Image (spheres, rainbow, N blue to C red):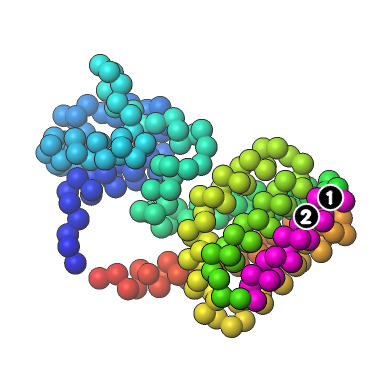
Amino acid sequence: MTAPRLADVVAREIEQRVLAGRLKPGDRLPSERDLSAQLGVSRASLREAIHKLAARGLLESRQGGGTFVTNRLDSGFGNPWEEILRDHPAVHEDMLEFRYMLEGRAAECAAQRATVADRERVRQCLAQLEEAFAGDDLDRQVDTDLAFHQAIAEASHNVIVGHLTASLLRLMRDNLRRNLSELMQVPAAREQLLDQHRAVWHAIEQGKAGQALEAAADHIGYVRQNLARMLRSDARLKP
């Protein structure tokens, strides 16, 4: 296995400081001299790492003012979060924890507020999901899964929930694709996932808010459990 470049190691360490909250959006990085000393690397390696992170949108340089953690991390989901999720798999658990809270509440609100048109849209999305799961087109399975959850978010009639869910699901598409690819190898998982989606739909259809929240939470809990299993498996395979 090829050893990672020093600049890449430094970039990951700076990312880790951001993720841990030791560097927050808007914070100025220590001076080049101080930071290179803290990290035990040359200024040249540090500059290269900062350049990489700036190109990815995590850092930004201000004329005569130093280098700062971008405020884009607070402004919405997308790059540089996509890069962080790819390079730091453990962050997926944090995203699923947030999804657990967000989608449970969305399903609860949808059960309380969905109009006839909303319920029909969710029903149609479920039918498309069932049709996709009957086949082997993984991308269609992913797309119909995302559409189902987004329809529920919009049926909550909370514009912030709808916006955040759309951003979050776009961000997690690759992760969802990987999850489904793994799960579809297990015969029972396909029907389990469908049953979980059906349970959410039936609770919304019947206006049972508590059951909708519980069903959505059960579904995300199942995904989280599967992700934890995959992460443990990946860790065992690493040299």
| Residue at position x 35%, y 53% in the image | 87
In the displayed structure, does residue 46 sit left or right of residue 201? left
In the displayed structure, does residue 63 sit left or right of residue 71? left
Residue 166 is covered by the magenta coloring: no
Numbered label attached to residue 219? none
| Residue at position x 34%, y 40% in the image | 56
Please state which amino acid type lies under the numbered disc 2. Arg
| Residue under label 2 | 121
Q: Observer-nearest residue: 214 or 11?
A: 11
In the displayed structure, does residue 229 sit left or right of residue 87? right
Where residue 196 appears, as percent x and y from the top left, is: 70, 68
| Residue at position x 27%, y 18% in the image | 63
| Residue at position x 76%, y 46% in the image | 156
* Mark 1: secondary structure: helix
Report whether residue 183 is seen: yes
| Mark 1 neighbour density, 10 Å: few (under 14) some (14–19) many (20 or more) | few
Secondary structure character of the magenta stretch overall: helix
Work out whether 63 lies above or below 204. above
In the displayed structure, does residue 37 sit left or right of residue 143? left
Picture quadrant of residue 30: top left
Labels 1 and 2 touching (C-beta < 8 A) = yes
Please state which amino acid type lies under the numbered disc 1. Ala
Q: Residue furthest top?
A: 64
Q: Which residues are magenta?
A: 116-134
Residue 132 is covered by the magenta coloring: yes
Picture quadrant of residue 72: top left
Numbered label attached to residue 117? 1
| Mark 2 neighbour density, 10 Å: few (under 14) some (14–19) many (20 or more) | some
Where residue 11 appears, as percent x and y from the top left, is: 27, 44
* Mark 2: secondary structure: helix
Report whether residue 105 is seen: no
